[in-house]
Image (tube, helix red, strand yellow):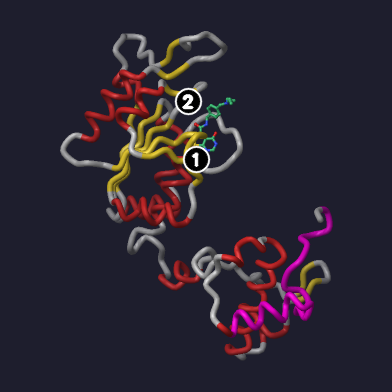
Amino acid sequence: MRIQVLTIFPELFERFLTTSLVGRAVESGRLEIGVRDLRDWSGDRHRTVDDTPYGGGGGMVMTAPPWIRAVRELAAGAEPWRVLLSPQGRRLDDAKVRELAARGDLLLLCGRYEGIDERVRLTVVDEEISIGDYVLSGGELPAMVLIEAVSREVPGVVQLPESVARDSFRSGLLDHPHYTRPPEVEGLKVPEVLTSGDHAAIDRWRLRAALAATLAKRPDLLDEARLGPAERRELERLRAGKGSPGVAGSAGSRDN
Ligand code: 9D3
């Protein structure tokens, strides 16, 4: 998998690209990432990449020529899928992450300021993607979100294949709760079944807990979840109010 990034803040990516899962993926050669400074394609000695908006109004707009020159140069030879991170984009989800990973070669465009001259999108962008409906200061954090999510789809990057298959949004359910030592925290004990050694019972508890958590916190996910007959039956039991205690519901004592 190759991912190129165009940004005026390349230094924002440094620690990210050498740390944890993404760092290991780069180190192992499964992921090749190149971060380039858009200002290298500016036309003047001040390395300017912005200008005042036609039509007036506040703020600055990123000027088209540096983007177009940069994308043409970075896309030469190969044909990377060119993604503009933008609040106007379609919201990133698990299906889109897998689709992008399958493309194998991405060029990510990160904007700053009030926006980018529309002619960039019209000439050198294949797809616009947002990571959600909240205002950030630019496309760099969204690009890192996308890179981390896509990296997890590259074969060999995630250590245990089982944990990918089991990840929430695979089954379409939220994860079940997790516990580790110590056995008691703030008066709260570990559910007994988890220390019973009965792995079939543990699997049943985890499925029930995942269903209960999804029902309580993200009921919208249940419409799309891939559930077998046993799971549907258990879900109906939970809906009828026959939930196991301590598997879902409100968090902590401050919220809800
Ligand atoms: C406050 C300025 N806004 C006026 C309506 C427009 C605006 C311009 C530029 C809002 C955000 C940005 C910078 N954001 C991104 O480039 C961005 C982004 C985001 O802000 N939220 C979620 N996903 C993304 S992807 C790129």
- Horizontal side of 255 relative to 229 (left or right) equals right
Between the C-alphas of marks 1 and 2, the distance is: 14 Å
Q: Picture coordinates of residue 57 (x, y %)?
A: 56, 11
Q: Looking at numbered disc 2 in the image, what kind of residue is underneath it? A: Arg
Above or below, 150 against 15 in this view is below
Q: Looking at numbered disc 1 in the image, what kind of residue is underneath it? A: Ser
- Horizontal side of 164 relative to 39 (left or right) equals right
Q: Residue at 35% across / 14% down in the picture?
A: 47
Residue 174 visible in this rendered orientation of the protein: no
Q: Quadrant of ligand 1?
A: top right
Q: Give the range drawn in magenta.
A: 230-254
Does ligand 1 reach within 8 Å of label 2's beta carbon?
A: yes
Q: Residue at 44% across / 46% down in the picture?
A: 146
The circle drawn on residue 130 is 1
Above or below, 211 against 140 in this view is below
Kindly report the secondary structure that dominates the magenta region of the rendered protein: loop
Task: Give the secondary structure at mark 1.
Answer: strand
Q: Return the residue at label 2.
A: 112
Q: Picture coordinates of residue 231 (x, y %)?
A: 60, 80
Q: Residue at 44% across / 48% down in the picture?
A: 19
**Total tally of numbered discs in the picture:** 2
Above or below, 30 against 181 in this view is above
Q: Does the magenta stretch include residue 85?
A: no
Q: Picture coordinates of residue 8 (x, y %)?
A: 41, 25
Task: Give the secondary structure at mark 2.
Answer: loop
